Image (cartoon, rainbow, N blue to C red):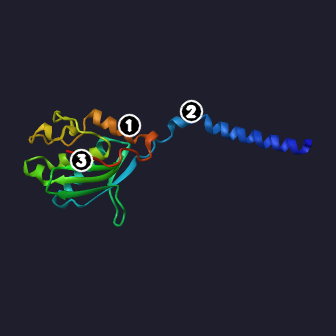
Amino acid sequence: MHARTFVPILATTFAAALVTAGQAHAGPADADAPAPAARVVTYDAGAAAEFRTAVDRGAAVWNASVDSVELRPAAAGQRANIRVLADDGWPRALTTSLGNGTVYIGRQAVDQGYDTVRISAHELGHVLGLPDRKPGPCTSLMSGSSAGVSCTNPYPDAAEQAAVEDHFGPALRQPAGVTGRVVTG
């Protein structure tokens, strides 16, 4: 190789190494970088019948409780991550993957006196990756029906919030989870 050819190649290689090194070794300015945006999970409550407002309120509870995921109503014509349906059975969630699935707001629990907003937030919690915690106190959203009919608390406790933050945190931006899991509330 001639010296004239070697020097430009060496200079180009050195410059590329500096750029790569600069990207690999973040400086103190990166500490001030904005936090990653919340993962948006859309829901369609169009078939939730008389429970539509309760579903919106349940989603708002989650939005006020966690930062790593945001539940939003799907725009017209947009395919939603979560479909919410009303039926005459017991409330339940069919989770296809983390942040995706179908929620059933069952009238059987409502007819027995359970709170519709708590039911909605609880079932959305399953799609956000949380299991039932039965038996459990009213302070635990995922205790579901075991907290009794008088429990109207729709808010996740600190452990439930932390679990959802872990599920949807920056390291887990891609959907994951167990396919075909049915969780009854």
Which disc, if any, is residue 50? none
Q: Nearer the viewer, mark 1 or mark 2?
A: 1
Around disc 1, counting alpha carbons within 10 Å, would you say few (fewer than 14), some (14 to 19), or many (20 or more)?
A: some
Does dot 3 land on a helix, a strand or a loop? helix
Type of the residue with mark 2: Pro
Q: Residue at x 21, y 39 (%)?
A: 141
From what the image shows, is residue 171 above or below residue 117? above
Residue 160 image-quadrant placement: top left
Which residue carries the number 1 mark? 166
Which residue carries the number 3 mark? 123
Q: Residue furthest front?
A: 180
Q: Residue at x 15, y 53 (%)?
A: 89
Q: Earlier in the sequence, mark 2 or mark 3?
A: 2
Residue 134 is situated, as x and y percent measured from the top left of the image, at 19, 35
Q: Camera-side residue: 33 or 24? A: 24
Residue 181 is situated, as x and y percent measured from the top left of the image, at 30, 46
Type of the residue with mark 1: Asp
Which residue carries the number 2 mark? 28
